[in-house]
Amino acid sequence: MINNRSLLIVGGLAAVAWLASNSLYVVDETERAVKLRFGEIIEENIQPGLHFKVPITQTVRTFDTRLLTLDTDPSRYLTLEQKAVIVDSYVQWQVVNPTQYYEATAGDELMASRLIQPRVDESLRNEFGRLNLQQIIAERRDDLMTGPTEELDKLLRDELGVAVRDIRVKRIDLPEDVSSAVYERMRSERERQAREWRAQGQEEAERIRANADRRRQVLLAQARARSETLRGEGDAEAAAIFSDAYGKDEEFFSFWRSLNAYRESFAGDGNMLVLDPSSDFFQYLKSPQGTSEE
């Protein structure tokens, strides 16, 4: 009797444990859930916490609502001028409507990625197709992806119950043939800019040089005028001094002038003068008083 009672108690406890384990479930803070009865949704968007379900007839599917990343394959797109670019990008998305997400993908993340990728590809193809290559190179990548992000977010919320939080371009490459053409055009553009800057520099140099030459001529003219004025003033003052000195002692002045003439005439080597010995040039050599002797 005791053994049977013990077995009944153990069996009852086991049944209670089984019932509890199959009736109670926990939804984590990073998840949302839906409750199903034979595959049909009977409770939507179950929030985090402890919940109850009927064993066997009811099942629960939980979905990760954290930010998920889909790394897409590099794709080739055509720009507005029909130039090819190879774009490597990724998408960050999040489940926001568990019911719609379950109905569209059966809760399979891989299935969701397969549905999201072609829509991302189409959106990027449209975005790059409306821009030329120069705009793609010059525009910031964050700004470039604003339009596709908003467009896909609205579309996939309605179709899959997921929100597109961000689309990021990791890399934009050019095919080899396009790269050569782009680099050649960039080189030509840089050479054109260099020629313009050189021309501007030469023009500025000529202007500075002409201005400096003009100022030089003005300064030289002013200096020449000043020197002529000073020279004239000096000559006038020298003439006045000579005249004054000559007037004070005419005989000494005549003697001093003759000595200077002798010095300058006989300063060089081998100088020879052919003069009449009775010439006045030798008057002070003949007599200290400068008078001719009879």
Image (cartoon, grey):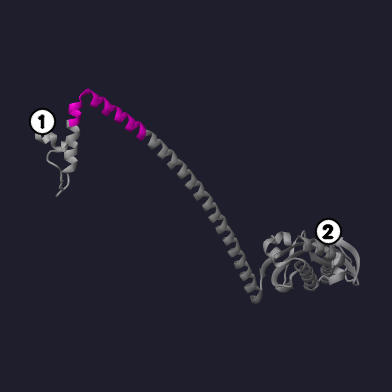
Q: In this view, does 48 lie to the left or right of 83?
A: right
Quadrant (top left/top right/bottom left/bottom right) for the C terminus: top left
Q: Mark 1 points at which residue?
A: 288
Q: Quadrant of the N terminus?
A: bottom right
Q: Which of marks 1 and 2 is in front?
A: 1
* Element class at badge 1: loop
Residue of label 2: 47
Residue nearest the viewer, comparing 222 with 58? 222
**How many discs appear?**
2
Q: How far apart are marks 1 and 2 (CA)?
A: 141 Å
Residue 110, label in figure: none
Which kind of residue does numbered mark 1 sit on?
Pro
Extreme residue toward the top, this view? 248
Q: Tell me if I can see residue 260 in this picture.
A: yes
- Report crowding for label 2: few under 14, some 14 to 19, many 20 or more residues within 10 A (C-alpha): some
Residue at the image position 89 percent from the left and 68 percent from the top: 36
Residue 227 or 249: which is nearer the viewer?
249
N-terminal label among 1 and 2: 2
Q: Main secondary structure of the magenta part?
A: helix
**Which residue is depicted at the point 80% across and 65% down?**
63
Residue range corresponding to the magenta coloring: 231-254
The reply to whether discs 1 and 2 touch (Cβ–Cβ < 8 Å) is no
- Between 44 and 169, the one nearer to me in the picture: 169
Q: Where is residue 2 in the image (x, y as percent from the top left)?
A: 82, 69
Confirm whether the magenta stretch covers residue 90. Answer: no
Tell me if 53 is positioned left or right of 258 in this view. Answer: right
